[in-house]
Image (cartoon, rainbow, N blue to C red):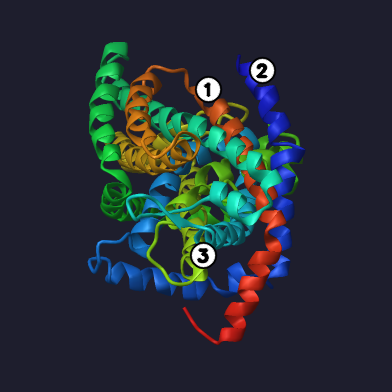
Amino acid sequence: MLYLLDRINHIVWGIPALFLILGVGVYFTFGTGFLQIRMLPMALKRFLDQFRCRNHSDGQISSYKAVCTALAATVGTGNLAGVAGGIALGGPGAVFWMWICAILGMILKFAEVSLAVHYRHKNEKGEWEGGPMYMIRHGLSPKWKWLAGVYCFFGVVAAFGVGNTTQINTVIYSINGVLRTHHVGASMIRNIIIGSVLAVILTMLLLGGAKRIGQVAECLVPFASVLYLILGAGVLLVCYKALPGAFRSIITGAFRPRAVTGGAVGSVMICLRTGAARGIFTNEAGMGTASIAHAGANVFHPFEQGVMGIVEVFLDTIVICTMTALVILCSGVEIPYGLDVGVKLTIEAFSKIYGDWVGIFIAVALCVFACATILGWGLYGGRCAQYLFGEKSWKSFAIMQGIFIVVGATMNMGVVWKISEILNGCMAIPNLIALGLLSPVLFRLLDQYKNSGTRL
């Protein structure tokens, strides 16, 4: 099964998804005059202003809560386990391609969020709904309606994989890793118990709907992210002399992998594909999923929320993923190139500086990140299910999510990751096609915004 999934993964992340992401990303980058770079300072300022005013709400989902919900889904196990696996499989150069995909991803996220807000509508409860499916349905001609259905189908399936079993599986793996250091063996019964407890808690939160998810995400994401960054900064302060070598290995490894990995990773294409796939896994740019959360924000102009998409990718990949990569490369931990070691490598890197106790913190951080991601993806999958099966399907979907949390606690990690990467690509393809077809609308909105003389 792993061999078959690996072949499918290479096909999906070959010409279809990879070149669409790079192609559409480059097209929007030049078409908007590198808007993601020019607007980044302003976007960060807006994010900080929203953070300071986060307690002021009129009952609607604020712009800040919407971006926290999106960050909850993106800042997850991919930032810890995905980056570590990417370095092991593609070499340090994979981090360079993550950065390139992040730069392109910022404009992709800006585009998909802006268009999602532009084409959104209100549901029976008076809540804003939007995302790639409504962007396709309302923005393109009826002959493209099937594409919205395809996207939602993969969205529902991916919510059980990318946003559920992958997350809980990594949590279980890290907890068992900590217990092994204290000479406690693995136990399937313990895995099922942990999965069941989390399933009950998260299912209850999912049943609370989009507003409840936003409230929880607003608390979990900043707290866990700041603590993780502080811990990572401590490693870099101790190992500051290794920083130049780490950056050198990233740049050199991007174009000459053999020179860094000793031949274990010898292809630039493998390095590029691994970096792109893991980068997209962490920030989800090009997949359109985050636009589902952003579309619920109470804003007046699409670009008000579009710039928050830029911030989302920047914080997720440029800040948190880079921190993980530098910790691994600076700590001096041995990297088993060619093997997808997942979170084990991240834990070993931190433990080399802080000692074995830090494994407990990483396990707790992973649990917080994973729970937040499951909630964020629960919103995505639930919206996709509602598009396909009607508004009343939310409750059934939430219960199924709880069941899959228990299932994920018992699955093989390699299979879970391969399936997740394939599903990421399958979701990105229809979304990127729609973004390309709707590019004239985005450019028109941009021209109107410039001519209006308004400022966000």
Which of the two discs, 3 and 2, sits closer to the camera?
3
Mark positioned earlier in the residue sequence (3 or 2): 2
Mark positioned earlier in the residue sequence (2 or 1): 2
Q: Which mark is residue 306?
A: 3
Look at mark 2 in the image and give the residue it sits on: 4
Q: Residue at x 30, y 44 (%)?
A: 209
Q: Residue at x 62, y 28 (%)?
A: 338
Q: Residues within 10 Å of mark 1 (few under 14, many from 20)?
A: some
For label 2, the SS is helix
CB within 8 Å, label 2 to label 1: no
Look at mark 1 in the image and give the residue it sits on: 414
Which of the two discs, 2 and 1, sits closer to the camera?
2
Rendering coords of residue 376 (x, y %)? 39, 44
Q: Residue at x 56, y 85 (%)?
A: 452
Q: What whole-number distance in Å separates the C-alpha atoms at marks 2 and 1?
A: 12 Å
> What amino acid is at disc 2?
Leu
Judge left or right: residue 121 versus residue 229: right
CB within 8 Å, label 3 to label 2: no
